[in-house]
């Protein structure tokens, strides 16, 4: 394969080859003149280095030589070819990934679904639902994106967190901290003037204990 690529590189005509050679030589000559002096010893290494550099420049100057130029650069640098992209998750279960477009559900087989134009997201216990925020709304959606329930407030909402017990959801609405039952009922204010920091539930799930700033 490498020999075949080398043959193609040497035999394929390059558009505007003469001007490309002149431009390449100008670049190489300027780089050689600005090099750091290394004494009076001379040998073949500087000449070979200049030849490789000239080949790289010439390859980059024309579309037919770009592919071969990439191969030469990888060979000279000793770089490994790019590996195929990950198409499956390394374990069972699903991932919840938040991007600029919104939260995504990534399935074990690598397929994914955009839940919507939401600004934040968090799984419920066992991944049955996802709680998301969007402007002044707090929404519980199913993994396929269908809304289960929603609340709307006067002030912007953020940092919704589902308790490990599954029975409570905490979130910020403006400067206050609020808690709602996991089915979207009995929404109430828990604290005033809290910091812009996400609340955190006690992880063992034995009691609905919430920490906040």
Image (spheres, helix red, strand yellow):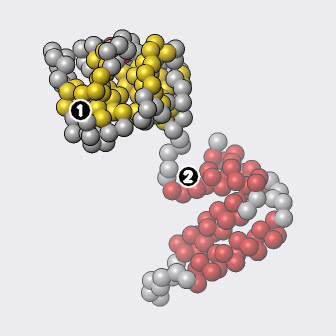
Q: Closer to the observer: label 2 or label 1?
A: 1
Mark toward the start of the polypeptide (2 vs 1):
2
Q: Is residue 85 left or right of residue 170?
A: right
Residue 191's tag is 1
Residue 105 at what x, y percent from top left? 47, 22
Placement of 213 over or under 59, stated as above or below: above
x 64%, y 75%: residue: 28
- Note whether residue 125 is visible: no
Residue 135 at what x, y percent from top left? 48, 34
Q: Secondary structure at mark 1?
A: strand
Q: Is residue 155 left or right of residue 15?
A: left
x 76%, y 59%: residue: 62
Give the alpha-carbon distance from disc 2 to disc 1, as whole Å: 59 Å
Q: Is residue 13 left or right of residue 130?
A: right
Q: Secondary structure at mark 2?
A: helix
Question: Within the image, what quadrant is residue 125 found in?
Answer: top left
Residue 162 vs residue 173, the one in the foreground: 173
x 70%, y 54%: residue: 66
Residue 4 at what x, y percent from top left? 69, 45
Residue 82 vs residue 93, the one in the foreground: 93
Residue 21's tag is none
Placement of 49 over or under 43, stated as above or below: above
Work out which quarter of the rendered image holds the N terminus and state it.
top right
Residue 166 at what x, y percent from top left? 28, 14
**Neighbourhood count class around disc 2 (C-alpha, 10 Å): few under 14, some 14–19, many 20 upward:** few
Work out which quarter of the rendered image holds the C terminus and state it.
top left
- Note whether residue 123 is visible: yes
Residue receiving disc 2: 74
Q: Is residue 43 left or right of residue 199?
A: right
Residue 17 vs residue 150, the one in the foreground: 150
């Amino acid at each position: 394969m490498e020999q075949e690529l080398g043959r193609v590189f040497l035999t394929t005509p390059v558009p505007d080859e003469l001007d490309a050679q002149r431009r390449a030589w100008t670049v190489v000559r300027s780089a050689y003149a600005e090099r750091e002096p290394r004494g009076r010893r001379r040998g073949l290494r500087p000449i070979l280095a200049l030849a490789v550099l000239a080949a790289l420049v010439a390859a980059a100057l024309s579309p037919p030589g770009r592919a071969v130029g990439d191969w030469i650069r990888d060979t000279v640098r000793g770089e490994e070819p790019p590996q195929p992209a990950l198409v499956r998750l390394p374990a069972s279960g699903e991932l919840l990934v938040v991007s600029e477009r919104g939260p995504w559900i990534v399935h074990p087989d690598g397929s994914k679904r955009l839940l919507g134009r939401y600004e934040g997201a968090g799984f419920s216990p066992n991944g049955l639902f996802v709680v998301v925020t969007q402007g002044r709304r707090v929404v519980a959606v199913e993994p396929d994106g269908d809304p289960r329930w929603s609340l709307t407030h006067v002030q912007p909402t953020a940092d919704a967190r589902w308790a490990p017990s599954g029975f409570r959801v905490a979130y910020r609405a403006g400067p206050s901290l609020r808690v709602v039952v996991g089915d979207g009922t009995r929404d109430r204010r828990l604290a005033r003037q809290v910091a812009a920091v996400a609340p955190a539930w006690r992880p063992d799930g034995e009691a609905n204990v919430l920490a906040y700033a």
